Amino acid sequence: MRKFFLIAVPYAWLLALFLIPFFIVLKISLSDVALARPPYVPQFSWDDGIMAFLRDLDFENFVFLTEDSLYWKAYLSSVSIAGLSTILTLTIGYPLAYGMARAPEEWRATLMMLIILPFWTSFLIRVYAWMGILSQEGLLNQFLMWTGLISEPLMILNTPTAVYIGIVYTYLPFMVLPIYSALDRMDGSLIEAAEDLGCSRLSAFWLVTVPLSRNGIIAGCFLVFIPALGEFVIPSLLGGSGTLMIGKVLWEEFFSNRDWPVASAVAVILLLILVIPIVLFQRNQQDAEEAAK
Amino acid sequence: MNSTVFAPWEDPEKKPLIRFQNVTKKFGTFTAIDNLSLDIYEREFFALLGPSGCGKTTMMRMLAGFETPTSGRIELAGKNIIPVPPNKRATNMMFQSYALFPHLTVWDNIAFGLRREGMEKDKMNARVEEMLRLTRLERFAKRKPHQISGGQRQRVALARSLAKAPTLLLLDEPLGALDAKLRQDTQFELMDIQEKTGTTFVIVTHDQEEAMTVASRIAVMDEGQLIQVATPDRIYETPVSVYVADFIGDVNIIEGKTTLIEDGQYQIDWAEGQMPLHAASSQPFDKGQTCFVAIRPEKVAISAEKPQAADNIVQGKVLDIAYLGNLSTYHVELADGTIIKSQTANTRRIARRSFTWGDTVWLSWTATAGVMLAR
Ligand SMILES: Nc1ncnc2c1ncn2[C@@H]1O[C@H](COP(=O)(O)OP(=O)(O)OP(=O)(O)O)[C@@H](O)[C@H]1O
Ligand SMILES: [Mg+2]
């Protein structure tokens, strides 16, 4: 009986917070837009019965998504922005995690704290702070002009560059923490053994350190890629009108156009795209756990 | 067997393979190795023995190149190796923790060092197969380290460190994790491999019996210094200090004051109301000098009747008997409270021995049975 409850709790959680909302969204995506409140039909009513209700649902909105090139371009550009951001985050995050894992024991807790510290401030405020840094009159441009490196302020805010900076900044901890935990668990004598057997420092790194932190790298990449793909705040605040990302399209569809059915269809497709990396991620986590046994 | 005994350390012409010259290693203000000099010869099986924290691992790590001495010189085959990084040294180390690469199979672990050398594929395959055969691991070649037993892992670590045919193989407590039986088998296996390959081995161990079994010479260390370096039998028979005598095997230590009788023969006054002891020493002792006589329990005879003639005879009561199967150790308490251990072979059935707990017995030993030590 106790066992049943233990299993029932997470499943009830999943049902209430994921499956039910998903089916509501799915239902809206199959409806038609209408001037009403809420702005779509059909609405379910007990008088007409369930068959009449189901008859009114169709895939019109999904067909529409394939007809307007805006949507697939937005999906594609989201995937490429999220992908490139992931690579950038890995490039910055790996050395950071490596340095932390190699730092003297007594420093590590502090370094870990510094990585986590930004989470104590609101995400929105941090993004606004970046607007202040990256704008034409912002801190970065002022600094570069003061050093004499540039004479004209650079246009960074409202370009894709700002989006990359924003995503890398925001998701860096998600990359650093799993890689750090993999490196921290690694037995230092393995590197010595590799050197003893003829490896240089660099080849010991490629042949031993990197393979042994593989699971951390994969986990970190997914933890950055998955949320970055649907990211909305960063592209809309830092990216300006030039950056096309599906999260932004979704928001506009929902709030500017008030076209809930199309917005829902966009969300359903986004979820389907995300299912692939999420499943891969789960499998990687399972492999990691088995290897650790 | 060869007619000549293997003892290159007695040949002044012979050049040592490894030479430590006044090596000191400090960690901060702590001195781990203290002005230590040592020669190790080719084809030796050299054991470093000592209590925890005495600097054994530090010695090995300096040989492998993971630690740089604070001062002094380390030579390998006549060349100073201190500036040489670990990957350029002709030494290989078998780590205490084995340090097998968890992401590689047994085969790839053994091949790891050969690949770095850029060895040809055919030659490498042959070499790995040879190592697998030597360590009897053929059946496990395709497994990962976490899929084999502790003893097998230890053999993989050995095979991996032997694969490159190093001039010098360093073994840091290689058998620490094994049970007694497997440990003994592996000791003989190690000796066998050492003989077959002709590699020089330096082994670190906590276990004095292990050192006695495998080593050509033993160095007993304490607090970063060498206390004695000698063959196992000399370490056992003629320890240079009470520390060494006590560290290796079981021993009775009797403290007393010396008086010379005639050359090499001393009388030792050691307790009120006890007859003085007699002992021999080639080292000179001053009159009245404090001395420690170390006598191995198996050199002390025990009997129910007073023996006719012996250099030293004392009487006592059996306090305790430690039965070891083939041997028994009797703890005998003398009138003044001193306890002396005597060990004899159990040639008779236990029920038939002529004395037991509480019985009065006589202990006796010859003048040459004990070693006189100044400290
Ligand atoms: N990196 C280090 N920093 C500071 N002190 C160290 C370091 N490595 C070793 N020591 C100290 O040097 C001394 C000798 O250490 P070492 O590891 O050589 O001992 P050991 O003889 O191998 O002991 P054990 O038998 O327990 O393995 C110890 O007191 C140890 O605390
Ligand atoms: Mg050690």
Image: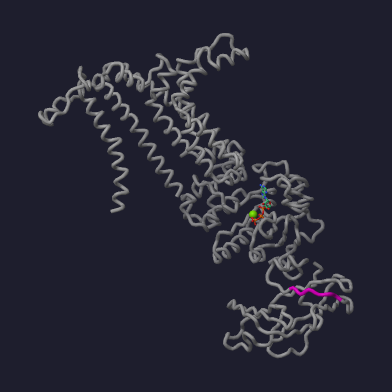
The vertical placement of A266 against B306, above or below, is above
Whether residue B88 is situated above or below residue B176 in the rendered picture: above
Residue at (41, 17) in percent of width and height: A243
Residue in the image at 54% along x and 64% along y: B179
Viewer-proximal residue, B273 or B262?
B273
- Position of residue B274 in the picture relative to residue A28 (left or right): right
Stretch of the chain drawn in magenta: B253-258
Q: To which quarter of the image does residue B221 belong?
A: bottom right
Foreground residue among A153 and B186: A153
**Residue A26 position by quadrant:** top left
Side of A16 where B358 appears, left or right: right
Percent across and percent down for residue B5 are 74, 65
Query: Up-down: is A11 above or below B361?
Result: above
In the rendered structure, the answer to whether residue B201 lies left or right of residue B99 reads right
Residue A99 placement (x, y as % from top left): 58, 35
Residue B146 coordinates in the image, percent (x, y):
47, 51
Furthest-top residue in view? A152
